[in-house]
Image (cartoon, rainbow, N blue to C red):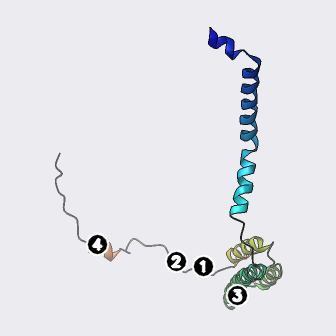
Amino acid sequence: MDLLLRLIERRTILGLACAAAALMIVNRFGGYWLERVDMRLHPPAAVSQPLATDLLKDNEAREAARIRGMHRSVSAELAAARAQGFKVEELQKLADDILAMDSPSYRPVVIERLNKLRMAIPQKKPFTRTAGADDQNRELDDAPVPKQTRRRR
C-alpha cells in the first residue's frame, strides 16, 4: 500500500512525465543530432569539378562515336542495297536527318530510329525452289540408325 501512495505523489508523476517527454524528443530528433555528429566526424570529400567535366566529355564523345558508327553501318547497308538495284535515296536522306538529331537528350531516340531504319532496308530475296519427289536428302539416308535399348523398370 505504501508503494501505491508513493506512485501517485505529484513529484513521481511529474518525473515520469518528464522522462516520457525526453524519450519522445530523443526518438523524434535523435537521428538529426546523430547525423550532425557524423558530419562533424566524417566530412564529405570535395568533388573535383574538372575531373567530373572530363568524365562527362569522355562519355559524350564515346556515345557520339557510337551513333556515328551506327550511321556508317546503315549507310553501308544502304549502299549495298543501291548496288543491288533498289532505290534507297529517301532512306539515305532519312538516315542523315536522324544523325543530325544526335544530342544527349535524343540519343535513345536516335538509336531506336537507326535500328528501325536498318530493318526497313530492302534486301534481295534468296533463291529457293521447292523440292521435287525425286529430290532426296542423301545425308539423312546415310545417317546411322540408333540401336533400340531396353530400359530397366
Counting residues from the N terminus, which is met first, the one under dot 3 or under dot 2?
3
Secondary structure found at label 3: helix
Q: Secondary structure at mark 1?
A: loop
Q: Which mark is residue 141?
A: 4
What amino acid is at disc 2? Thr
Q: CA distance from mark 2 to mark 4?
A: 23 Å
Residue 72 is tagged as 3
3D distance between C-alphas at marks 4 and 3: 47 Å
Q: Is residue 81 left or right of residue 129?
A: right
Q: Which residue is at the front of the view, 112 or 49?
A: 49
Q: Are marks 2 and 4 in contact (CB under 8 Å)?
A: no
Q: Residue at x 66, y 89 (%)?
A: 80
Q: CA distance from mark 2 to mark 1?
A: 9 Å
Q: Nearer the viewer, residue 54 or 130?
A: 54
Dividing the picture into quadrants, the one containing residue 107 is bottom right
Q: Nearer the viewer, mark 3 or mark 2?
A: 3
Which kind of residue does numbered mark 1 sit on? Lys
Residue 4 in picture, x, y percent from top left? 65, 12
- Check if mark 2's residue and mark 1's residue have beta carbons within 8 Å: yes
Report if the CB atoms under discs 3 and 2 are less than 8 Å apart.
Answer: no
Mark with earlier residue (3, 1): 3
**Mark 4 nearby-residue class (10 Å; few <14, some 14–19, many ≥20):** few
Q: Which residue is mark 1?
A: 125
Q: Give the CA distance from mark 3 to mark 2.
A: 31 Å
Residue underneath mark 2: 128
The percent position of residue 34, horizontal first and vertical second, equals 70, 51
Q: Name the spot of residue 22 as percent of width and height, x first.
A: 74, 35
Packing grade of label 1 (10 A; few <14, some 14-19, many >=20) is few
The secondary structure type at the circle numbered 2 is loop
Q: Which mark, by number, is residue 68?
A: none
Please, what secondary structure does the residue beneath circle 4 have? helix
Name which quarter of the figure residue 98 lies in: bottom right
